[in-house]
Image (cartoon, rainbow, N blue to C red):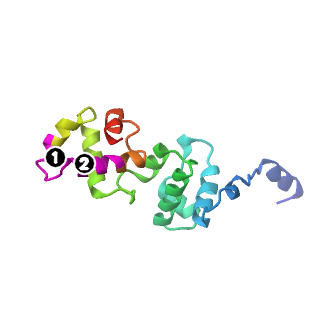
Amino acid sequence: MDNGQAKDAARHFNLSDEVFHHPGMDIYTQMTFIVLKCFSSESNMPGLSDIAKLGRMSIKQATKALQQLVELRIVSHKIFRRMVGDFQDDRLSWAAKGLLTFCKENPSIDLSDLLELSSESGEDEHSIRKALKELNEYGYLEEYPVWSRIAN
């Protein structure tokens, strides 16, 4: 690279130290943050395997790093779900994942109908509410206001 090309490249390189101002952020989370910052828009976001590859980490480490970025409110739940998928989030129990599937297929069902259906599976109101709280805590009920109200 000649001197002119080096100056041109330096002019377009911009790096923020923002990533270092979040205490407790591990190296994988910092690297995931840097990888995400390299992409210009939400429509151009890399997939989970791309983040892992670019960040030189495993998919599991990239998933954990994205979870931490969500907890720090740097990445939205919506983007996290789009990148990781509903069923790759290991913070959710199988009961919550099953209930999420049901929510997607029946977005307007109310609690009494749900409890009536749950009796067929042996679940009680407590376990249904626990799964709903879990989904709400991790941002999975943002599109389902009825379910979100029930979870509180």
Determine whether 40 is above or below 27 in the image.
above
Q: Which mark is residue 118?
A: 1
Taking depth in this image into account, of 149 and 21 the one nearest to the observer is: 149
What's the amino acid at mark 2? Ile
Crowdedness of circle 1 by 10 Å Cα count: few (<14), some, many (20+)?
A: some
Determine whether 142 is above or below 60 in the image.
above
- Quadrant containing the N terminus is bottom right
Q: Residue at x 57, y 67 (%)?
A: 56
- Left/right of residue 84 with respect to residue 117 in the rendered view: right
Q: Residue 137 carries which label?
A: none
Q: Residue at x 38, y 36 (%)?
A: 143
- Left/right of residue 94 with respect to residue 88 in the rendered view: left
Give the mark nearer the N terminus: 1 vs 2: 1
Q: Residue 128 carries which label?
A: 2
Taking depth in this image into account, of 96 and 54 the one nearest to the observer is: 96
Q: Which residue is drawn at 28% across and 47% down?
A: 129
Q: Which range of residues does the magenta coloring cover?
A: 116-133
Crowdedness of circle 2 by 10 Å Cα count: few (<14), some, many (20+)?
A: some
Where residue 152 sits: x, y (%)?
A: 36, 41
Q: Do the residues labelled 1 and 2 touch (CB within 8 Å)?
A: yes
Q: What element carries label 1?
A: helix
Where residue 78 sits: x, y (%)?
A: 46, 43
Q: Is mark 2 on a helix, strand or loop?
A: helix
